[in-house]
Amino acid sequence: MLKKLIYTLFLLIFGVTANGQVNNQPANKVSILFMGDIMGHDEQIWSAENRETHTYDYDTVFTYVRPIISEAGVAIANFEVTLAGPPYKGYPQFSSPASLAVACRNAGIDCMVTANNHAADRGKTGIAGTINRLDSLGIPHTGTFLSQESKEALQPLMIRKDGLSIALLNYTYGTNGNTVPEPVIVNLLDKDRVAADIEKAKSMKPDLIILFLHWGNEYDTVPSANQTEMAGFFFSKGVDLIIGSHPHVLQKMVWYRDGNEMTKAVIYSLGNFISNQRKPKTDGGSMVKIDLEKEGTSWKISNAGFYLTWVYTPIVKYRKQFYILPCSEFEKRPEFFDNPADFLQMKQFIDDSRRLLNNQNLNIKEYIYNGSSWLLNN
């Protein structure tokens, strides 16, 4: 009873209702920031551990991107680990310390999506443990559920921010062959099932319906035919934004503009937000910001842009550290890097990413840091 009371008070203080709604006073503009895969490889766990107390702290990981995240009205990320408790382990069956989720919350991430191919890595214990721990931390989430009854009550996740209402749905193509034991649920990407859930979301009359999909082919920078076909299908059913994760590399971003109407956008893959993957193109990703503006009684996308991010892993006192860097802010600061090779590796990621996105994106440009602020590179 005491735990429930404390949780309820936390939600009220931070503007989140008990059914996962984020509330604020009405306004005319809201920005939504999307982040890709939050992974928990062995080296990340070892880096975060205090060897004396055997506690974990990930806060420094987000030091350089915290200002961007905190500025967003709503920040949503793919949480691609379980919180199943010890033994803590990375690939192939992830279980991270809950301190990782705490650091995400401290950095300004408001909501998590949890349906991904690693959701069932630790079976029922991992699925339920992740849900219960995120609940205890006051972090709204969707994609996995304790039971069918819980899913029916909590899906879609309704987010309310400054007068904007958002219905968020989350699905994964699979769970790496791992069984999802009853009664817990991992949302699977079945077109008919998703279409039915979209109809339920529409009945709640949100201003915006977002699908966050774990889909596509790993390490492929070009969306598959299946991805593009599904995107068109879900748009036809009334979805406004489709956000993709899973490939661990960037894929194109498309904003379909249509005058003053509410328009559609699809981000096929955000890439990795934080991980220990170091091969070319997997060592970074993007944060995508969608700006919405209210005109009369309806909302429309007024701007859409991306921030390139890269994971910097210097060795400090014989231990690898992890920092997410906003690329544009650091691409002209070689003196920041202890090892010149790290700077060159980041520059290679930037060059590869810009070559891909500048050629394939539609109406979604990069945010560039001018020394004091971030501006769209229009």
Image (cartoon, rainbow, N blue to C red):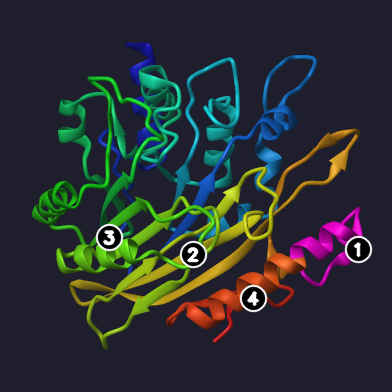
User: Who comes first in sequence, dot 4 or dot 2?
Assistant: 2
Task: Say which mark, if any, is on residue 335.
Answer: 1
Q: What secondary structure is found at the residue carrying circle 1?
A: helix
The stretch of residues the image draws in magenta is: 331-346
Question: Mark 4 Cα within 10 Å, few/some/many (few <14, many 20+)?
Answer: many
Give the residue displayed 31% in from the left and 61% down from the top.
226
Callout 3 touching callout 4 (CB < 8 Å):
no
Give the residue displayed 39% in from the left and 28% down from the top.
120
Q: Amino acid type of disc 2?
A: Val
Across and down, in percent, residue 13 comes to 40, 36
Q: Amino acid type of disc 3?
A: Gly
User: Who comes first in sequence, dot 1 or dot 2?
Assistant: 2
Q: Quadrant of residue 346?
A: bottom right
Q: Which residue is mark 2?
A: 288
Mark 1 and mark 3: Cα distance apart in space: 44 Å
User: Who comes first in sequence, dot 3 or dot 2?
Assistant: 3
Q: Which residue is mark 3?
A: 163
Which numbered mark, 3 or 2, is in the foreground of this view?
2
Q: Amino acid type of disc 1?
A: Glu
Which numbered mark, 3 or 4, is in the foreground of this view?
4
Mark 4 and mark 2: Cα distance apart in space: 13 Å
Q: Amino acid type of disc 4?
A: Ile
Give the residue displayed 20% in from the left and 77% down from the top.
296
Callout 4 touching callout 2 (CB < 8 Å):
no
> Is 209 left or right of 245, judged from the image as shown?
left
> Is 277 left or right of 241, judged from the image as shown?
right
